[in-house]
Image (tube, grey):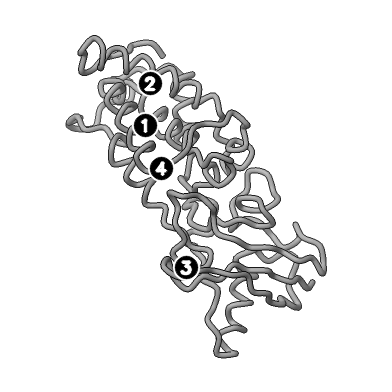
C-alpha cells in the first residue's frame, strides 16, 4: 500500500514549524505506524535529508512515549490503542495522513512530533509516591485490601502518562492523568495516610503548570489508550473537596480514610 504523509516539521522549540509532505510507498499493511515512519526516515536519510523526529521506546503500548496526533486523533483512529500498536491496515491505500505533535500549552514542541511532557513528571513529584517507610516486605495477608479497591487501583495504575487525555481535551486538562495517578495510591491502605496532602499538591501543581479545567466532554476517556475511566475524575474532585475542608479550614494535616 502507498500513503501520503503531511507531517509537522519544527527544527526546535524556538523556531516556527510547518507541514511538509512525503510519499510512503510499497508498505506492508501489517507493519506498525512507527515501522512505517522508520521506512520513511530511512529514505530521508539516504536522500541526505533530516529524518522525522518522533518518540518511541517499548513499542508495546506500555511506555506511552510514541504519542502524536494522527489525522487529528491522539494515537490515531483505533480505540484503546497507542501509536506504536496502530497498524497501517487501519488506513486506506492512497490515503493522506496528517501527523502533528500534541497541541497543549504545558506540552511545548521540542522537535517535529516530540513534545516536552515533563510537566507530568513535576505533578508526580508532588504526590505520585508513598513516603512512609514500609520496612521489610509484608506477608501477603498482613494488609487486607478489599478486592473492589484493589481492582480499581489496578485500573488507575494502567495509566501510562502518554498525555493523550490532555491532547484530546479542548481545555488541555490533565484531570484524567492526575485522577488516575492519585487514585491508584489513595485506594490502597499504604496510600491513605498521605491522601489529603497528595491530592492537594498534585492539583495545585497541575494548575501551576498551565493545564486547563475539566470540560466534562469525556474526550479524555475516549482518547486514552488504556481506557482510564472519567469516574476517577469524579473521585478526585470529591477527594479534593474533602482534603481542602480538612486541611485548609480545619487545620488537619492528614486524614486516614478507612473506607474502600
Q: Could you give the CA–CA distance between mark 2 and mark 1, rounded to whole angstroms?
A: 8 Å
Q: Provide the secondary structure element on which disc 3 rests.
A: strand
According to the image, label 1 marks what residue? Answer: 203
Residue 147 to residue 115: above or below: above
State the residue in front, 140 or 115: 115
Q: Is residue 79 left or right of residue 142?
A: right
Q: What residue sits right under mark 4 in the picture? A: 210
Residue at point 59%, 44% (across, down) = 168
Q: Pick whichever, 115 or 147, lies toward us.
A: 115
- Find the distance from the CA under tag 3 to the CA under tag 2: 36 Å
Quarter holding the C terminus is top left
Q: Residue at x 37, y 52 (%)?
A: 118
To which residue does mark 3 refer?
111
In front: label 4 or label 2: 4
Q: Which residue is mark 2?
A: 240
Q: Secondary structure at mark 2?
A: helix
| Category of crowding for the residue at label 3, using alpha-carbon neighbours closer than 10 angstroms: few (below 14), some (14–19), many (at least 20) | many
3 or 2: tag closer to the N-terminus? 3
Where is residue 178? Give x, y as percent.
42, 35
- Proximity of marks 1 and 4: CB atoms separated by less than 8 Å: no
Q: Quadrant of residue 227?
A: top right
- Mark 4 touches mark 3? (CB < 8 Å): no
Distance of mark 4 from mark 3, alpha carbons?
21 Å
In the foreground, 9 or 148: 9
Mark 4 and mark 2 lie on one chain; the one further toward the N terminus is 4
Sequence-first tag of 4 and 3: 3
Q: Residues within 10 Å of mark 1 (few under 14, many from 20)?
A: many
Write the residue at 77% across / 60% down: 91
Amino acid at each position: 500500500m502507498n500513503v501520503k504523509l503531511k507531517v509537522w516539521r519544527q527544527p526546535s522549540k524556538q523556531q516556527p514549524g510547518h507541514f511538509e509532505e512525503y510519499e510512503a510507498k510499497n508498505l506492508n499493511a501489517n507493519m506498525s505506524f512507527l515501522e512505517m515512519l522508520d521506512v520513511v526516515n530511512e529514505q530521508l536519510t539516504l536522500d541526505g535529508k533530516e529524518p522525522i523526529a518522533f518518540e518511541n521506546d517499548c513499542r508495546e503500548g506500555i511506555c506511552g512515549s510514541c504519542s502524536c496526533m494522527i489525522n487529528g486523533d491522539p494515537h490515531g483512529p483505533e480505540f484503546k490503542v497507542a501509536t506504536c500498536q496502530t497498524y497501517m491496515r487501519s488506513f486506506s491505500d492512497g490515503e493522506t495522513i496528517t501527523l502533528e505533535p500534541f497541541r497543549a500549552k504545558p506540552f511545548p514542541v521540542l522537535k517535529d512530533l516530540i513534545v516536552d511532557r515533563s510537566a507530568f513528571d513535576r505533578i508526580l513529584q508532588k504526590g505520585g509516591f508513598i513516603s512512609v517507610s514500609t520496612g521489610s516486605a509484608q506477608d501477603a495477608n498482613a494488609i487486607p485490601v478489599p478486592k473492589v479497591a484493589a481492582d480499581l487501583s489496578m485500573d488507575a495504575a494502567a495509566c501510562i502518562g502518554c498525555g493523550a487525555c490532555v491532547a484530546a481535551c479542548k481545555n488541555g486538562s490533565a484531570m484524567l492523568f492526575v485522577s488516575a495517578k492519585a487514585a491508584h495510591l489513595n485506594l490502597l491502605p499504604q496510600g491513605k495516610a498521605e491522601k489529603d496532602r497528595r491530592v492537594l499538591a498534585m492539583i495545585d501543581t497541575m494548575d501551576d503548570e498551565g493545564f486547563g479545567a475539566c470540560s466534562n466532554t469525556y474526550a479524555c476517556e475516549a482518547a486514552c489508550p488504556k481506557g482510564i475511566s472519567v469516574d476517577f475524575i469524579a473521585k478526585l474532585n470529591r477527594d479534593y473537596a474533602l482534603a481542602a475542608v480538612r486541611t485548609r479550614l480545619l487545620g488537619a494535616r492528614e486524614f486516614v480514610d478507612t473506607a474502600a
